[in-house]
């Protein structure tokens, strides 16, 4: 099966059911060189949410969905 065949099979499966994909997401996100502001966005200002957000990759679904979608 070629890479393109696998991609098409994955897309077809995603239309039929919920898929959970796991892999090297952390490494791929780190390669983007994101800063604290990328993790905070407008939604999590430091005065309301003190402490470091950088490295909280789960929050990127809210603050940088473009990164998550691209990956």
Image (cartoon, rainbow, N blue to C red):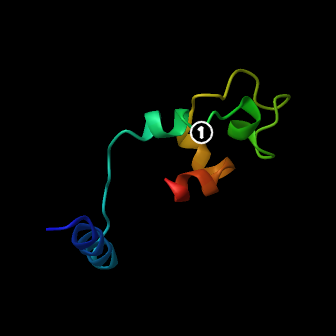
Quadrant assignment, res 65: bottom right
Q: Is residue 47 above or below residue 63?
A: above
Q: Residue furthest front?
A: 2
Q: Residue furthest top?
A: 51
Q: Residue furthest right?
A: 47
> Does residue 53 appear to the left or right of 23 in the view shown?
right
> Does residue 64 appear to the left or right of 58 in the view shown?
right
- Seen at 23% across and 67% down, the residue is 6
The spot of residue 60 in percent (x, y) is 60, 45
The spot of residue 30 in percent (x, y) is 54, 32
Q: Is residue 69 above or below residue 57?
A: below
The spot of residue 42 in percent (x, y) is 81, 46
Q: Which residue is mark 1?
A: 32
Please, what secondary structure does the residue beneath circle 1 have? loop
Quadrant the N terminus occupies: bottom left
- Seen at 45% across and 35% down, the residue is 26
* Front position in the image: 65 or 59: 65
Query: Dot 1, how many residues are within 10 Å of its Cα: few (below 14), some (14-19), or many (20+)?
Result: few
> Does residue 49 appear to the left or right of 2 in the view shown?
right
In this rendering, the count of numbered labels is: 1
* Front position in the image: 52 or 12: 12
- Seen at 64% across and 28% down, the residue is 54
Q: Is residue 52 above or below residue 71?
A: above
């Amino acid at each position: 099966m070629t890479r393109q065949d696998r991609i098409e099979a994955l897309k077809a499966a995603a239309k039929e059911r919920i898929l959970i994909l796991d892999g090297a997401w952390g490494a791929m996100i780190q390669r983007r060189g994101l800063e604290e502001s990328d993790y905070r966005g407008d939604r999590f200002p430091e005065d309301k949410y003190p402490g470091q957000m950088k490295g909280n990759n789960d929050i990127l679904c809210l603050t940088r969905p473009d990164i998550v979608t691209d990956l």
